Amino acid sequence: MRTATLRAAALAMMLPSCAGVVSAQATARSRHAASSAVKSTGRRNAREPGSSPAEEARYHERAMLLRDRIIDAAEWNDFDQAACNPGSLRVFARDTAKATGEKVLDDIETLERIIIARGVDSSLDTPSARAVIRMVVAWEAASIRPRWDGKAGEAPHHAIATGLSGEFLNPETKKCESYIPYDSVTVVIPEATGFSMPKLKGTVVNLFVGEAGLHKSRDQFYAANRSAAEAIFNYIRLRAVVVWRDFAVIGVNRPAESKGVRELPKGAGGAAYIFHRVGDEWRLLTITRTWS
């Protein structure tokens, strides 16, 4: 079972007041829905210990229906594929009619609420949960790009880079180079017993677990940079992870801190995602919202 702190983070972090839905381009409506989602998730929609298999099956059937509708409503922005691995972005450009556009938003928000409500107390100490956490960490560390979830038989599309981890074509060298070289990253994940991260090509992941891990990572950074008065501690934090059956909702923050006590306004923002597992592969369904 999760601690109360992690449960609150799962509810609140998924739906931040500063959020702007990227996939469906929502604004104030999303913030209102976010508040409602937290309230409803904490009351009658929350999973009870005696939840029956039939009830679970009904919720999963509804989640799959919502997933299918989201995919059917989507189009691809593939950017300039001659550029440096730009990836693809799922968009809903054809939903120009207000009613249709709001229906897509409703589907995304409803699916997110179902996953959080049904899975918020689920353990992260499972192979499936560990797999999606590893994938997100590798994505944030610029090591991989997850595949987008899509229709059966559809050509694969891979996600865009996260944060500042993308590449650009250097006009002098004529080579693709990283905006910010990720030779090492500090990552903080929620409490997960026995979690390990395989080595990533070209990037060292300094992994820490939970609040105690966050404090330890700060102490290590400032001890190593004691002589640098203006040293900035940048790290990636999986602030909340909810895994329910073959769906997951994950919220990521990329803070920048000064002296471990003051969060700076110029971090690399954050994002909330919905994932869906197909076989043994976790795939990205939506970049639900981002913030800066």
Image (cartoon, helix red, strand yellow):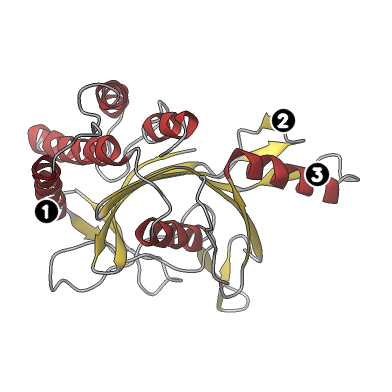
The disc placed on residue 81 is: none
- The local secondary structure at tag 2 comes to loop
Give the amino acid at mark 1.
Answer: Asp
- Separation of residues labelled 2 and 3 (CA atoms): 11 Å
Identify the mark nearer the N-term, 2 or 3: 3
**Residue 3 shows in the view:** yes
Q: Is 77 situated left or right of 161 in this image?
A: left
- The local secondary structure at tag 1 comes to helix
Spot occupied by residue 273 in the image (x, y as percentages of width and height)? 35, 47
> Would you place residue 222 above or below residue 202 in this image?
above
- The local secondary structure at tag 3 comes to helix
Q: Is 38 situated left or right of 101 in this image?
A: right
Give the amino acid at mark 2.
Answer: Val
Q: Nearer the viewer, residue 145 or 61?
A: 61
> Would you place residue 171 above or below residue 288 in this image?
below
Q: Nearer the viewer, residue 138 or 4?
A: 4
Q: Quadrant for residue 127, please give it.
A: bottom left
Give the residue displayed 35% in from the left and 68% down from the top: 80
Give the amino acid at mark 3.
Answer: Tyr
> Would you place residue 41 above or below residue 216 in this image?
above
Give the residue displayed 30% in from the left and 24% down from the top: 42
The disc placed on residue 222 is: 3
Crowdedness of circle 1 by 10 Å Cα count: few (<14), some, many (20+)? Answer: some
- Separation of residues labelled 3 and 1 (CA atoms): 47 Å
Crowdedness of circle 3 by 10 Å Cα count: few (<14), some, many (20+)? Answer: some
> Would you place residue 108 above or below residue 39 in this image?
below
Identify the mark nearer the N-term, 3 or 1: 1
The disc placed on residue 261 is: 2
- The quadrant of the image that shows the N terminus is top left
